[in-house]
Each structure stands twice: as structure tokens, then as C-alpha cells.
Amino acid sequence: MSAAMRFRDKTVLIIGGNSGIGLAAARAFAGEGARVTLTGRDRATIDSAVAAIPGAVGHDCDVADLTTTSALIDALAAAGERVDVLFVNAGVGGFAPVRDVTPAQWDQVHGINLRGCFFAIQQALRLIGPGGAIVVTGSIGADAALAGNVAYASAKAGLRATVRILAKELVGEGIRINMVSPGPIETPLINRNPGMDAAAVEGLRQAMIAAVPMHRMGAADEVARAVLFLASDEASFITGADLRVDGGTLELR
Ligand code: NDP
């Protein structure tokens, strides 16, 4: 099979596929022959994504509300769907220095980025069999001592531990699970930091670019290509790994 159609006849479920990295991955999977089901919270961007991607289907799912995650998987199961590739990509940012972090902010970031992602994987496992592949979006923030990033970084570090443990638990079932950890990527998330005004967001962007040896932000497509590699049979001997896509930010510091 040509490398350009690695996902022909495969079913791909993307949790958080209506924006940024998830949307770029949805396009790329569909471009290589996959049937894509993508989810998000925002109905308008789900609809526009589905309209732009041939054969794609969209569902509402707020991973912070576990009933919507289980309802999504129930609906797919009732329709007789299987999942060959699961891409768990939902995530929110949130900067605050240590004294300003509130329990509500902490719970929101951890509720989506760690708890919500874990239970999305747990639920989706009902539809994944031998040969299945799972990719989870982490962040180099888990390893970078970036001031103000404690809630986000700790959630992503927990998610990486989750991936390693699930890799161990699932390897005997023939299911692989890996993480892709982006550095700064130009997506809506970067401009949506609650509590930061436009000038502070721009300051953060410039600080992030200054830390990247390639002196630029990454593009969502550059992360999507790594996701597709990890999800494909080209990565058939890789599980429990964390692939950084960060322009050398951590390796070269
Ligand atoms: P976007 O904001 O464009 O995308 C975030 C995605 O997550 C959207 O599809 C969004 O859907 C979904 N999402 C957010 N909250 C929930 C929720 N409660 N339930 C279900 N889906 C949800 O940003 P990115 O593309 O940048 O982010 C994608 C992933 O990449 C995230 O996990 C992020 O942490 C990670 N990342 C991003 C980096 C960057 O620099 N951009 C760097 C490192 C990691 P909706 O809009 O409908 O809520």
C-alpha cells in the first residue's frame, strides 16, 4: 500500500477534532483514506469541519462531562462502529502564577486535559481491538519549567504517565498507545488564555518563539504528520513513546 493512503478503510475517532491540531489531523487522516469521526464542544466549528472533510462525521462531546463521553461511545457502538485509530487531543490552556491559581481553574484544566482525556480513552477502548492505535496529545510543557504553567504542565505530565501505563496494560492486547508532545504551535489555543490581555498573549508568543531553536512557531500540520506516523503501521514497533514536535526546543536547550 502506498504511504499516501495509510488509512484506507480505517475508522479514526478524534476527540477534539474541530480546531487547530485536531482539525489538521482530521484533514490528513481523511486525505489518506480514513473515515473520520471528530468531536468537540463548539457546534459551529464541528459543522464547518465536517463540511470541509469528505466523509467526516461530527459529534458533540465535552470530555469534562463524562456522561457525554460515554454517550458518544454508546452511539458509535449502537451504530456498529469500530475504532482503528483513536486520537485524544482535547485540551485547554490556562496561565496563572502560583498564588493566583484557583481551585476552579485547576479543576477545569485537570478535568479536561487529564481526567477527561483518560476517561475518553477508557470509554473508547470498548470499540478498539487488536491492531488498534491510540495517539494522545501531550505538551513539552510537561518538561519545561515555564513559569505560570503549573496547572497545565502537571496535567500533561500526568497524561504522559497515563500513556506509559496504558501502553504496558494494552500491549498484550495488540493495542499501541503513544504521545505526541508539541512545542509552541500556531492555533487558536495560543490566543485563548483566560486572564491574559492581547499584549500579554503576544508577549508570551514572543517568549515562546525565542525559546525555539528554529525561531518560529510550529504549524498544526507539522504535528498532524507526527500523529499520523504514530497511528500508522509504520510505527508498528512503537508503543509508550513520547514524540516531541518542538523545533528542538527541549533537546537543544
Ligand atoms: P485548539 O484550541 O485549536 O484545539 C483544542 C481542541 O480541544 C478543540 O478541538 C477543542 O474543541 C477541544 N476541547 C477543548 N476542551 C474540550 C472539552 N472539554 N471536551 C472536548 N473537547 C475539548 O488548540 P490546539 O490545537 O493547540 O490544541 C490541541 C492540543 O494540543 C491540546 O491538547 C493542547 O493542550 C495541545 N498543545 C498545544 C500547543 C500549542 O502551542 N498550540 C502546545 C502543546 C500542546 P472545542 O473548541 O469545541 O472546545
Image (cartoon, rainbow, N blue to C red):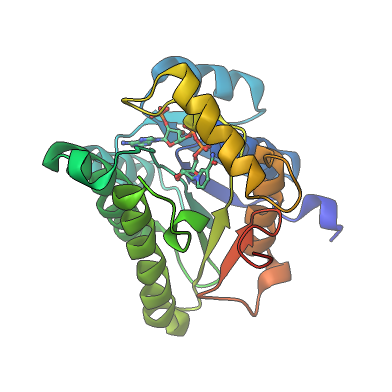
Towards the viewer: 24 or 85: 24
Give the position of the C terminus as an image quadrant: bottom right
Residue 63 located left or right of residue 140: left
Question: Is residue 195 something that shows in the picture?
Answer: yes
In percent of the image, x 57 and y 23: which residue is there? Answer: 49
Identify the residue at horizontal 65%, vertical 41% (top origin): 209
Q: Nearer the viewer, residue 239 or 86?
A: 239
Relative horizontal placement of residue 232, taking residue 139 as reference (left or right): right
Work out which residue is located at the far bottom of the displayed protein and give it. Answer: 172
The x, y position of residue 32, in whole percent, is 75, 45
Where does the N terminus fall, quadrant-wise? bottom right
Where's residue 137, x and y in %? 49, 53
10 to the left or right of 41: right
Q: Quadrant of residue 118?
A: bottom left
User: Residue lying furthest right in this view?
Assistant: 2
How far across and down, in percent of the image, does residue 221 sit? 70, 40
- Residue at horizontal 63 percent and vertical 63 percent from the top: 230
Q: Position of residue 11 (x, y in %)?
A: 56, 49
Q: Is residue 44 left or right of residue 96?
A: right
Q: Is residue 71 above or below residue 121?
A: above
Quick check: 230 above or below 123? below
The residue nearer to you, when weighing 25 against 94, is 94
